[in-house]
Image (spheres, helix red, strand yellow):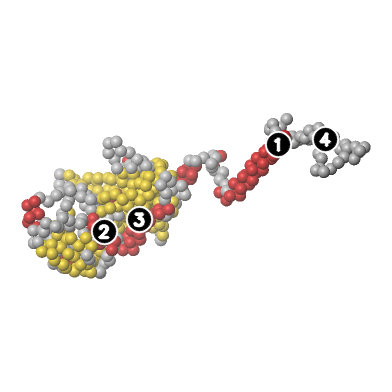
Amino acid sequence: MSFFDDDFFSPKVSRRIKRKWHGQTEAPGWKQKKLRRNSGRKWSTVQVAVVSSVISALLAVVLYSWLVGAGTASQQPVAVAGGENAYDPYERIVQAAEKVSPAVVSIVNQQKSIMDDSEAVKDTNLGSGVIFSQENGKAYVLTNEHVVQGADKLEVVLANGQRKNAELIGKDRVMDIAVIRMDDAGVTAVAEIGDSKKLRRGETVIAIGNPLGFGDSLTAGIISYTNRVIPVSLNQDGIYDWEQMVIQTDAAINEGNSGGALVNLNGQVIGINTMKIATTGVEGLGFAIPTNEVMWVVDQITQYGKVVRPYLGVYTVDLNNPYAPITQEQREDLQLPLEVTAGVIVLEATGPAKKAGMQLNDVIVRFDNEPIGTTLDLRKYLYEKKKIGESLDVKFYRDGKLMTTSVELSDKPE
């Protein structure tokens, strides 16, 4: 019996049906010859279909196995010590940590304080760093500026516990980056710097550092955001006067992790851990400075001992400062026209600004016809669009009158 009830789909033909051509007559006495039938058993349609399906499935499995094997032949895992399976999803974390950990160090910041006007007591702060270069008997360590800030003495502790004195080469408060140097005796590894522009959200990363003094500590997480912009108060006065581009991660970053390495699964440093947001009900918000920005600062520091940026020479406060708004009486003293609602008030003028005639209570509103509404606008324009030695046209209000002066920008003095 076939799968179908109608004769059209049936492989059998009834013997009672005789074929007769149109117009053909049967000669008398003509006998139909009998056809010999094969003695072997014939396969039904169902059997043919089943066998064909099995063969097709086997061929598909073989073909797929061959394609996968050819495509991944160069990526076959190598057996690791102890017989662990290299297909273990956490094995890459283990291998990345083993590669970069020897290049991550702990930094001890020792500061002197005076008690009772006589006794000197050393105050100690802890941080982390990354060895990024080794040459001429010296090893160079990358860390945060706030890790080395105010240090009277710097000490580096290698991953193997060896302690070394270090000296500060240079630092940059804007980017929160510093470079220190020590002798390279006992240094066994230099970190490989990766390309932070290739990071993808959700990519697995690890953070290595010295949280709370527990050196060579490892945490793991993912990239939560690749290019987060967060406001920063450079003067630590609660007024945001700069914006920092950072990598956001949920890998645990705690006090002492600052200056340590954020590492991808290839064992490459792609960020320098710098801060976290810690408050009630908040967790998993850690930030690292991307290495592509870090290494530009490092090149400046190793070449000049600092980051060379244009310097105007004004200390300012925003006209519309939400944290310390000016009073109506103060605004009247500035004699500003009613239409002026944004700008920065000069509290002190030094260097190039003073030389160009700027003074207290001048309200800057434009640089080269570009609106300047906040101190952040002022810094970003100077740092991103101007160079040392260039002239800057400054428009400002003084006693209610719009004035213009030209300032020749210089390097900031130490």
**Residue 374: image location, x then y, percent:** 20, 55
Numbered circle sitting on residue 182: none
Q: CB atoms at circles 1 and 4 under 8 Å apart?
A: no
What's the CA distance linking mark 3 and mark 4?
82 Å
Q: Is residue 197 left or right of residue 348?
A: right
Q: Quadrant of residue 343?
A: bottom left
CA separation, marks 3 and 1?
A: 76 Å
For label 3, the residue is 294
Q: Earlier in the sequence, mark 3 or mark 1?
A: 1
Q: Residues within 10 Å of mark 3 (few under 14, many from 20)?
A: some
Q: CA distance from mark 1 to mark 2?
A: 81 Å
Q: Amino acid at mark 1?
A: Phe
Element class at badge 3: helix
Query: Mark 1 or mark 4: which comes first in sequence?
Result: 1
**Residue pointed to by mark 2:** 380
As drawn, the label of residue 9 is: 1
Q: Nearer the viewer, mark 3 or mark 1?
A: 1
Decide which of tag 2 and tag 4 comes sooner along the chain: 4
Q: Amino acid at mark 4?
A: Gly
Answer yes or no: do the residues labelled 3 and 1 have beta carbons within 8 Å? no
The residue under the point 70% across, 33% down is 6
Coordinates of residue 355 in the picture (x, y in percent): 15, 68
- State the image quarter where residue 83 is shown: top right
Left or right of 263? Residue 306 is: left
**C-alpha distance separating marks 1 and 4:** 23 Å
Return the residue at label 4: 40
Please give left or right for residue 306 compared with residue 74 in the image: left
Mark 1 or 4: the one toward you:
1
Quadrant of the image containing the C terminus = bottom left
